[in-house]
Image (spheres, rainbow, N blue to C red):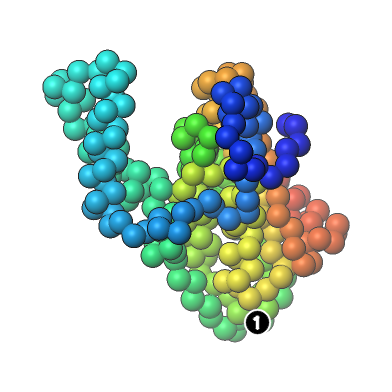
Amino acid sequence: MKQKGTLSNTPLESEEIDEVGDDHVGSAADTPLRPDAFDMSDEDKMVKIEGHFKEIMETLGLDLTDDSLKGTPKRVAKMFVQEVFSGLNPANKPHARLFENKYKYDQMLVEKDITFYSHCEHHFVPIYGKVHVAYFSSGKVIGLSKINRIVQYYAKRPQVQERLTVQIGNELKKALNTEDVGVVVDATHLCVASRGVGDTNSKTGTAYFSGKFEQNQTKNEFLNYINAK
């Protein structure tokens, strides 16, 4: 993958647009959102998306009077707002409640093979795979299901894998009140498998290491655990 600088606001030519998408360029660690992103209600967004998606289908030549297709614009609008991109809305962010570490457990805690589904922000096709998370308690622990919910929250938005990995890592540090966090993401990108180069076998790996996980011994312990059969 070629290295790219931060994208500017200069209009891109058609070839540059394709290159940006194929080279998996990301513009920032935060998801790019307009200041007015949530001025419109979810219901109004769904109505608007339904109309636009209907127009897309008609432009493609599809017959929306067909029983199988006529409900598709509404279904897609609901899916976009309430399901696959619900992580864009901060109102859906999970509240991570902490509990006293009564067991005095001071070793690495690992939760591996968290399944996630996201969407590539360059082509709006799925990214799917596994997230592996580890942390050392700072005196508090978090319910295991909340780790999954944090992963799903950031996955349910248009993404690039690098940003998703950083966002999960940063959120876990805040939620757990510790610097000692490790995150590894293994994913398949359908923008690579189903279009473009058409490679159905490759996977992409990204990692985030902070605190103790920057030490080779701790990092290797984590990696060995998630790679164990």
Nearest the viewer among 165 and 24 is 24
**Could you say where residue 200 lies in the image, as x and y percent from the top left?**
58, 22
**Could you say where residue 83 lies in the image, as x and y percent from the top left?**
35, 48
Say which residue label 1 marks: 139
- Residue type at tag 1: Gly
**Could you say where residue 197 lies in the image, as x and y percent from the top left?**
61, 18
Residue at image coords 70%, 59%: 182
Nearest the viewer among 128 and 81 is 81
Residue at image coords 63%, 63%: 170
Question: Count the marks: how many?
Answer: 1
Q: Would residue 71 be visible to someone looking at this image?
A: yes
Whether 21 is drawn above or below 78: the answer is above
Whether 101 is drawn above or below 74: the answer is below
Location of the N terminus (image quadrant) = top right
Location of the C terminus (image quadrant) = top right
Q: In this view, does 109 lie to the left or right of 98?
A: right
Residue at image coords 25%, 30%: 54
